[in-house]
Amino acid sequence: LFVSAQHARRLYDLDSAASLLKQFSGKEDAPKIAVRYTYITLAMAGKIDEAAAFALADLQESKKDYLPLILVVADYAKKGQYKKALAIADSLPLKGAQKYFNVLVKAWLLVGDGKPQAALKKLGEIAKVKAFEGPFLFHKGLISDLTGDYKSAEKYYVELIGEGGKNASIRAVQVMISFYRRSGQEQKAKELLAMYKKHPERPASVGDDFLYPSDPAAPVDSAAKGLGEALLGMATNFMNEREGKDTALLLLKTVSYLDEGNVTVRVLLAEGLGET
């Protein structure tokens, strides 16, 4: 079973691999590592709730492992159990850039727990980290937007985009266009779209309908979706690493679980990981 599962996994037949691994890990003589293979493969296949159940069972053996912890945190958040998610998040490892991503994760869990001011204060921990200047502004804007502090949200979004759109990214532009349209500033939204059309780093596959959809809904209308945005940034980081493809796929599937309508995930899955 294990050999067959590994073969299916190498071929990215993840549903078959996950099914075989579930059978294998349930055997009395199965090695402990089988459980890890099972939840990672389930998550890569997009079955996050099942993956989280296996990950939770494995936490006694791998308390300092990032992946099972983040799967359990995401599952609790999806189910609105933010206090449980916060308790698990306290065990997230603090190696390298992970400690900064952890700040984003915990901030959104605090929002979900009804403590938006504590969340904004938490974000202050990365305010002076140069590499996280963009995420700091982006998530402060999203939290302010979600909680109705629109003046602050616009301030953070404008600062994020930068003068002349020099710091514009697909997601930042998409979010800010949505904000302008929802706040009755249609002309500013059109000007931003026109500016981004000329941006040298705009992917050719990103059309106007992606940035300017018929329904300018708020990009984040729950703390769980905000957590998804934090994990989306983490996934992008792993996509840029040589050996990060599987981890990126796992995280992107977790974002889809938290925010099924996140079109940015679909673009990244199609362009970065070859999934349609």
Image (tube, helix red, strand yellow):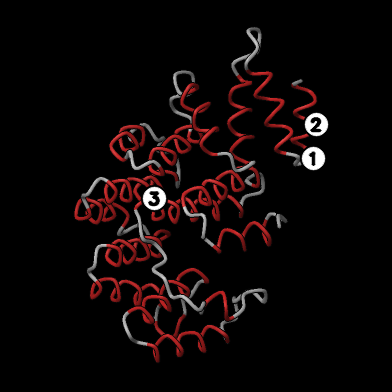
In the image, is 108 to the left or to the right of 193?
left
For mark 1, does the 10 Å Cα neighbourhood hold few (<14), some (14 to 19), or many (20 or more) residues? Answer: few
In the image, is 139 to the left or to the right of 58?
left
Number of the front mark, 3 or 2? 3
Residue 226 in which image quadrant: bottom left
For mark 2, does the 10 Å Cα neighbourhood hold few (<14), some (14 to 19), or many (20 or more) residues? Answer: some
At label 2, the amino acid type is His
Q: Determine whether 25 is above or below 246 in the image.
A: above
At label 1, the amino acid type is Leu
Name the residue at the top extreme: 29
Residue at the spot 31% in from the left edge and 71% down from the top edge:
156
Query: Is label 2 in a helix, a strand or a loop?
Result: helix
Quarter of the rendering occupied by the C terminus: bottom right
- Which residue is denoted by mark 2 in the rendering? 7
| Image location of residue 137, percent across then percent down | 34, 65
Residue at the spot 39% in from the left edge and 62% down from the top edge:
220
| Image location of residue 125, percent across then percent down | 28, 52
- Which residue is denoted by mark 3 in the rendering? 224
Tell me whether circle 3 and circle 2 mark residues in contact (CB < 8 Å): no
| Image location of residue 115, percent across then percent down | 21, 50
Disc 1 from disc 3: Cα separation: 32 Å
